[in-house]
Image (cartoon, coloured by chain):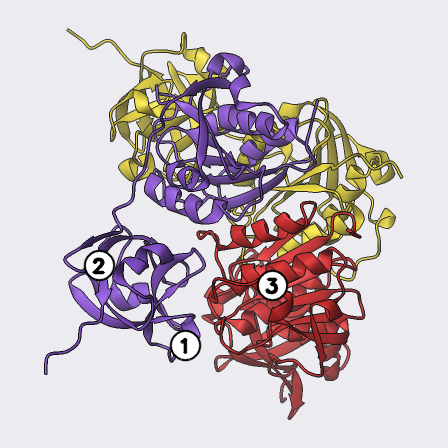
Chain colours: A yellow, B red, C purple
Amino acid sequence: MPVRRRPIITLTTDYGLEDPYVAEVKAKILSLVPDAQIVDITHMIPSFDERRGAFILLTATRHFPRGTVHVCIVDPKVGTDRRGIIVSTRLGHTFVGPDTGLMWPAANASGIIGIYEIDGSRLPPRTSETFHGRDVFAYVAAKLAMGVRPSRLGRRVDCMARVEFFGPKISNGWLNAELMHIDKFGNLITNISKESLTMLGPTSGKYEVELLGHRYILPLCKTYGDVPPGSMLIVFGGTGFLEIAVNMGSAAEATGARVGERIRIRREQASPC
Amino acid sequence: MPVRRRPIITLTTDYGLEDPYVAEVKAKILSLVPDAQIVDITHMIPSFDERRGAFILLTATRHFPRGTVHVCIVDPKVGTDRRGIIVSTRLGHTFVGPDTGLMWPAANASGIIGIYEIDGSRLPPRTSETFHGRDVFAYVAAKLAMGVRPSRLGRRVDCMARVEFFGPKISNGWLNAELMHIDKFGNLITNISKESLTMLGPTSGKYEVELLGHRYILPLCKTYGDVPPGSMLIVFGGTGFLEIAVNMGSAAEATGARVGERIRIRREQASPC
Amino acid sequence: MPVRRRPIITLTTDYGLEDPYVAEVKAKILSLVPDAQIVDITHMIPSFDERRGAFILLTATRHFPRGTVHVCIVDPKVGTDRRGIIVSTRLGHTFVGPDTGLMWPAANASGIIGIYEIDGSRLPPRTSETFHGRDVFAYVAAKLAMGVRPSRLGRRVDCMARVEFFGPKISNGWLNAELMHIDKFGNLITNISKESLTMLGPTSGKYEVELLGHRYILPLCKTYGDVPPGSMLIVFGGTGFLEIAVNMGSAAEATGARVGERIRIRREQASPC
């Protein structure tokens, strides 16, 4: 059996860290691929929050090397007739999980070249329908990591479900976008990439940011320490996306913003004389 | 020295994730077995809660392959005269930890074939009596993973301490059991296995569940999505045990139940005409 | 390329467990060293708290074997002109991270033999200045784990920044020290080592501990269970440092103490007749 050397399998779930669920997924994988290099992306996705999971997957998975298998599970409809899928990409990544749209942004950014609906009849019989993370997706991920082709585990299909984010799009000179995630430091992370921001012209200088009805004039900085401690700024952070931040502080506390808010941004306007 | 290839060692503790303790256990293991595949089951057992740890171990460990060594530490009496033990089982698992009963349910389910009291005189000298997780059990687990026989690390004994759960047992047509764990999704997990539920006859249809003085008529479903969002159900979940759940919601919030409650369940009674 | 077998790389950060940051660091390491044995020491250092990180590193890193590379990141000044450094030690450990003093206590205890300022011109070009944990330190750690010498990644320098703890020092018969950390069990962990406590004479018997204006007469015990449940004691805990503890309880709750408090301790005084 052609086992690659220490295949990397990542796990992204809403299972949390107090329950036995993550360990059961790993047990299943290691039973089949004892050498697997399993990496937890996070298990702290808010329960059932596919949009949050989709954003975390988009930012984290692209840093892994070719050949990585990503198990992606936020699965409120486990055991119903929602499909399980495998998605292979041009950059050499493979995504496995329920077809709830969760993996769409990451897979799409990686260049989708094949989508396969997992065929339950090719898997071991299940005694439970509540834990496909362990009984279906861990098994499939292990098989893929062992070199089994997706076409051996399911049939090729044409489409998959999609979580889509709002914008970024230009309207009346404003770039409209969404607040996707608030990180541990209180940084407010949007879905505005560097490329998106160029829709407003050269990316430098000051910007006007509207959030929760307030307008902030903020400098676009290279890093947090470019402004004094306690000052607010915008910066492309570790996710690759634009974030509203406070140097040595929490923009979440400063603004009261929550994930899911719409935000808009434009270049600073010249003041009337 | 006969080192097996990438032996799997699992860790289940109440050490939490903020302190250096888990890393020190891993450092000790890796110093002896650099190739170990170490899997965290959980470190979030409530402090000193042996019953909770026992239940997590029971549900998680059985999914690991033969040859796995399970380090199990909830150890309020560390450094006193409580024994440290090694338990080997028919299914090829080995449990290591303080003899506080914590590992009893999991080891028993795996078929105990030998219990050994760890002999401190066969271990390196200790400078501390407060951290046997690192100084005793990590060392012993590493040695076992290297292929050392339990009889080389201690002497065979006849018994071990036991954490026992309440029930499940039939009384007056009710199956009495215990609420063992509430998971991240708010599912109320009992100690009723599929086999136990057959004490009430064929496992299907509706059941009457009594919890905290309230009675609920609940359908036994295959999965959460078999009822509408917000509706309550009973289902055999990822642990293999019966749980009271709310589809897309939290049964813990809906009922106010806490771990340790007694529950009882019977088949739905025909209404009087 | 001379890759050692399964090099150990530890990670200590304030990144938390909900964001994609830790996984991105691991992705970078595994892209270069697929066989790395990556160990999370903790990612729960309070944001920007270099002193806390320094103490955790001091206690955890010394248990790892020779050859371990420790990535140490609490980095409020990321992307500014603060240096990145590599520190190699007599005990065979290598520390990598921002030169903010964080790694000083651990590196110093391990016997510093070389300090190197990382030379950005020897690294791949960066597109971001906000995430040196991934773009600089993970890369450097992976190279070091592959056997690249520090001198190939930077130039030797004479000094590094230092986080220093308060005391322990004797004044008027009291040993003055600092409360460094409160662990998950509520143990109050000081920076008093066994060696430090000998400044007060033989280490046994009872001690007077002053904390937040209160004085406690506490026995120095070998382990928690040497006093009845609910009783307070002092003990050298799993960190190797003296801690104020309550058997089966929380000294943090019992005293209201917080990290950073000064404490002082002396031998119990004979009562006046």
- Position of the C terminus of chain C by quadrant: bottom left
Q: Earlier in the sequence, mark 1 or mark 2?
A: 1
Report the chain holding disc 3. B
Task: Give me the disc on residue C141.
Answer: none
The structure residue drawn at horizontal position 80% and vertical position 48%, both measured from the top left corner, is A32
Q: Which residue is mark 2?
A: C264
- Asked where in the image residue A11 lies, by quadrant, the reply is top right
Report the chain holding disc 2. C
The structure residue drawn at horizontal position 60% and vertical position 63%, both measured from the top left corner, is B137
Mark 2–mark 3 CB contact (< 8 Å): no
Q: Which residue is mark 1?
A: C226
Mark 1–mark 2 CB contact (< 8 Å): no
Q: Are marks 1 and 2 on the same chain?
A: yes
Report the chain holding disc 1. C
Q: Position of residue A184 (x, y in %)?
A: 41, 40
SS of the residue under disc 3? helix
Q: Which residue is mark 3?
A: B137
